[in-house]
């Protein structure tokens, strides 16, 4: 199902490819994060893309605009379907990322990847934000960063399921909202380290475009059966 992105948070490229094969048709895409990318590099992304899979390259770029543009250019060349940057890097940095995605895609003759902005990490609470100098309440900070991402020409944001509704209200129907932190119902009762969670159907109803789900699927005895149960819940939503 299109909306389900499975986080391939595994220890090797071989295991990632095995999981991707097992989940083909159930998952709408796969997320490659910084650990797997650091271990296996762009070759793994290309191999996943070659199987026909949509790959969300979750490297959360955050640097000066020129460096981020070059990183997005390199990410586009892997064939990634979606890439992300930290929205707190500012509007000029996000504008550079959006421009780089379009220019690289044009040069390479392929569709541009979606570029989304990370708002506030789900591991941060208001205390941690305040230490970093952010005085406003967390939901307001998320909505403000989402509006900046939209103004900079990004396709959407990554936000916790709890903030999906306010972001949807602030940024409109066409804005992509990617949400991790999915737990409960068909995604299982075990929360791991996710604090601000929501069930799959509930997150979709709140306005999420894509759900990123890792451990409830990849650590299940049958990842395929776990993914299918989630897809079934989403279909009924
Ligand atoms: O295993 P789980 O379902 O918690 O996986 C969620 C995935 O989404 C992990 O790869 C995690 O790094 C990522 N993520 C997150 N919270 C964010 C951004 C990314 O959990 N704010």
Image (cartoon, grey):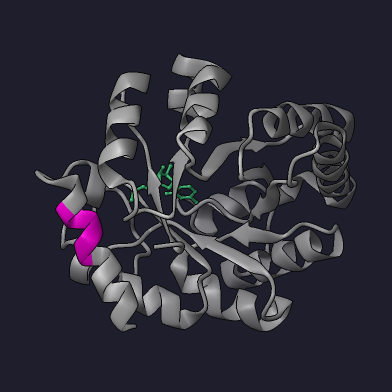
Q: Quadrant of the C terminus?
A: bottom left
Q: In this view, does 1 lie to the left or right of 124?
A: left
Q: Where is residue 94 in the image (x, y as percent from the top left)?
A: 81, 48
53 and 160: which is toward the camera: 53
Depicted 184 relative to depicted 122: above or below: below
> Which residue is pictured at 9% across the width and 43% down the height?
221
* Residue 12 seen in the current view: no
> Which residue is pictured at 80% across the width and 62% down the height?
148
Q: Where is residue 228 in the image (x, y as percent from the top left)?
A: 22, 61
> Which residue is pictured at 55% across the width and 26% down the height?
46
Q: What stretch is highlighted in magenta?
A: 225-229
Depicted 10 relative to depicted 184: above or below: above
Q: Is residue 153 left or right of residue 134?
A: right
Q: In which quarter of the image is the N terminus?
A: bottom left
Q: Where is residue 14 in the image (x, y as percent from the top left)?
A: 32, 20
* Residue 183 seen in the current view: yes
């Amino acid at each position: 199902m299109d909306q389900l992105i499975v986080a391939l948070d595994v220890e090797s490229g071989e295991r990632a490819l095995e999981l991707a094969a097992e989940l083909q048709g159930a998952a709408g895409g796969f997320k490659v994060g910084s650990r797997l990318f650091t271990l296996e590099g762009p070759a793994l992304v290309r191999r996943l893309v070659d199987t026909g899979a949509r790959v969300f390259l979750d490297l959360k770029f955050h640097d000066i605009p020129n460096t981020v543009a070059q990183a997005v250019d390199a990410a586009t060349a892997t064939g990634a379907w979606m890439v992300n940057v930290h929205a707190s890097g500012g509007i000029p940095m996000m504008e550079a990322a959006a421009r780089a995605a379009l220019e690289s895609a044009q040069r390479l003759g392929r569709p541009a990847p979606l570029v989304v902005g990370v708002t506030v990490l789900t591991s941060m609470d208001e205390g941690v934000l305040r230490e970093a100098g952010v005085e406003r309440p967390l939901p307001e900070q998320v909505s403000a960063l989402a509006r900046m991402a939209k103004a900079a020409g990004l396709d959407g944001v990554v936000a916790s399921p709890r903030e999906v509704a306010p972001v949807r209200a602030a940024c409109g129907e066409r804005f992509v909202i990617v949400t991790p932190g999915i737990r409960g119902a068909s995604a299982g009762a075990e929360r791991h380290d996710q604090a601000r969670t929501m069930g799959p159907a509930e997150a979709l109803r709140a306005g999420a475009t894509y759900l990123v789900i890792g451990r409830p699927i990849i650590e299940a005895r049958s990842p395929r059966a776990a993914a299918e149960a989630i897809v079934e819940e989403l279909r009924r939503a």
